[in-house]
Amino acid sequence: MAARRPIGLKQALGYGALIAVALVLLLPFAWMVSTSLKGNEAIFAIPPVWIPETLRWDNYAEVFERMPFLLYLRNTTVITVFTIIGTVGSSAAVAYAFACLRWPGRDMLFLFVVATMMLPLQVIMIPLFVLFKEFGWLNTYKPLIVPAFLGGGAFNIFLMRQFFLTLPTELFDAARIDGASEWTIFWRIALPLARPALVTVALLTFMFAWNDFLGPLIYLSDQAKNTLALGLALFTGQHQTDWGVLMAASILMMVPVIALFFFFQRYFIKGFTMSGLKG
């Protein structure tokens, strides 16, 4: 077995810098965890107390007593799951058409799709609200879910297209020679090979839909349909001084995001890496 090469000074300094930056970025999260286990006296103590003498685990129990956390969790989960399904499926189909099919105006239309990323949300917010009002979709989950099935967003299309371009075209040509339809090639060949990109798009969509505050705020008026993000905002307005309980609710909301990222981080990194290999 070959001996492991010793780490050089330059590499050690690089690792040290990365560790230092990581610790700085983790400080806000560590403070959230610490605050969620404190009473109000310890939260505002000077000098700050990172580890209180008495850990208040009751803050997490009070989250379920003071707000319908499980109801908001269910609402958020429904919106997030359908948004992921729509975004991953539609963006993959559109990206496959842009990357693997030849048709007139393809590249020009792709440039137009990418250009839409420069439009700020504030520009289309009012027209979308008026459109969904005419459809009778206000105070329903349709404005938050249906658009995901109509393309999946310009960035996701771009990411998937870049990944499809890294796949060998010989596979698709051989399948066409064998008589496979484009749907069969897309479903049986392209999608299995594009698993890292699919996972990346799914994770990005999950983080956006899970933490989305503006969309539910605009389209939902019934509190029974609120999401976790809206629920936390209402909790802040009703209990402005109980920061321990608020931080506990925030930690509970963050747990699924952190767990999914660590579980799928290998695919996440691979998806971004391979999507930038070919233009």
Image: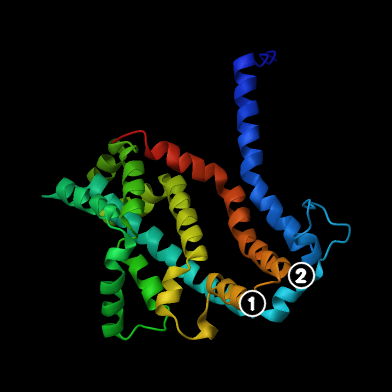
Q: Secondary structure at mark 2?
A: helix
Give 14 or 44, whichever is nearer the viewer: 44
Q: Quadrant of residue 141?
A: bottom left
Q: Residue at left 61%, top 44%?
A: 25
Q: Please, which residue is most extreme toward the right here?
A: 53
- Residue at 48% across / 51% down in the picture? 199
What x and y, as percent, mark residue 181? 25, 54
Between 114 and 276, the one nearer to me in the picture:
114
Measured from the top left, where is residue 51 in percent x and y? 82, 53
Residue drawn at 33 percent across, 42 percent down: 162
Task: Give the quarter of the image for residue 92.
Answer: bottom left
Tell how many labels. Answer: 2
- Residue sitting nearer the eye, 269 or 235: 235
Per the image, label 1 sits on a secondary structure element best described as: helix
Residue 54 location, x and y as percent?
88, 61
| Residue 84 shows up from this direction | yes
Residue drawn at (45%, 43%), measured in percent from left and top?
271
Q: Which mark is residue 59?
A: 2
Quadrant the N terminus occupies:
top right
Q: Kindly report the distance in space between the C-alpha atoms of the residues bearing marks 2 and 1.
A: 16 Å
Is 46 displayed left or right of 251 in the figure? right
What amino acid type is highlighted by mark number 2? Asn
- Residue tagged by mark 1? 70
| Mark 2 crowd level (few <14, some 14–19, many ≥20, 10 Å Cα) | many
Could you tell whether 199 is left or right of 249 in the image? left
Q: Residues within 10 Å of mark 1 (few under 14, many from 20)?
A: few
Q: Name the kind of residue labelled 1 in the image.
A: Leu
